[in-house]
Image (cartoon, helix red, strand yellow):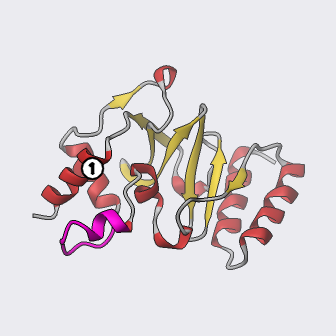
Amino acid sequence: MNMEEFRSQLKTIVETHCSERKKGDELEVLRSEFNHSIRIIDSNESVLKYNCYMFALDFYQKEINSLDIKQYFIDELFIIYLLNNEILKSISEDILEDNDLIIYFVNNNPVHSGKVRSKRIVSKWGSDILCEHMALEVPINYGWSYRYYKYLLKENVRNCFRKYNE
């Protein structure tokens, strides 16, 4: 199995409506065909209440609700805002630290994000699983292009999100 087939299989697993346990079982079956290092991990927050961008920025619904603004979640448009305004600072892979961000792109548009943890990536896949993986061990629809960015403090995210919503 080549990398493209492997990543296509990951996409199918993520898009399947089944339990986290069943998805974990499917990842194990896939491991026999493609020796990957993906593992599903527990989340401190209910995975149904946040998306990949909220997870990567460590800015969840309770923080958004405290701002008294109209937008109720962080999406790729906010990530574009952070990139266009050079708030996110690009960094090289050799100086990564825990909590730095990875953003995946398709046609230069952000489609997925995660954060660095012990030289690996942790990101939310689809609506219901949080995974630890290597940079390209992601579903194919997350693209082949990615860049790393320096971690933003929660207060900076809060201020930027407030300004973005003005």
Q: Residue furthest right?
A: 32
Q: Quadrant of the C terminus?
A: bottom left
Residue 67 in the image: state x and y as whole percent. Answer: 21, 66
91 left or right of 27? left
Q: Residue furthest top?
A: 94
Residue 37 in the image: state x and y as whole percent. Answer: 75, 43
User: Which is the main secondary structure of the residues drawn in magenta?
Assistant: loop
Question: Can residue 64 be found in the magenta stretch?
Answer: yes
Magenta segment boundaries in residue numbering: 62-73
- Of the pair 150 and 2, the residue shown nearer to us: 150
**x 22%, y 52%: residue:** 81
**x 61%, y 42%: residue:** 136
Q: Residue furthest left?
A: 166
Question: Can residue 112 be found in the magenta stretch?
Answer: no
| Rendered position, 138 above or below 89 | below
Task: Tell me if I can see residue 2 in this picture.
Answer: yes
Helix, strand or loop for disc 1: helix
Q: Quadrant of residue 101?
A: top left
- Of the pair 16 and 1, the residue shown nearer to us: 16
For label 1, the crowd category at 10 Å Cα-Cα, with few meaning under 14, some 14 to 19 and many 20 or more, is some
| Rendered position, 112 above or below 15 | above
72 left or right of 95? left
Task: Tell me if I can see residue 106 in this picture.
Answer: no
Residue 132 in the image: state x and y as whole percent. Answer: 65, 47
**x 64%, y 40%: residue:** 134
The kind of residue tagged 1 is: Val
**x 58%, y 47%: residue:** 122
Q: Quadrant of residue 151?
A: top left
Residue 61 in the image: state x and y as whole percent. Answer: 37, 68
134 left or right of 33? left
Give the residue number, with chain letter if any, for mark 1: 157
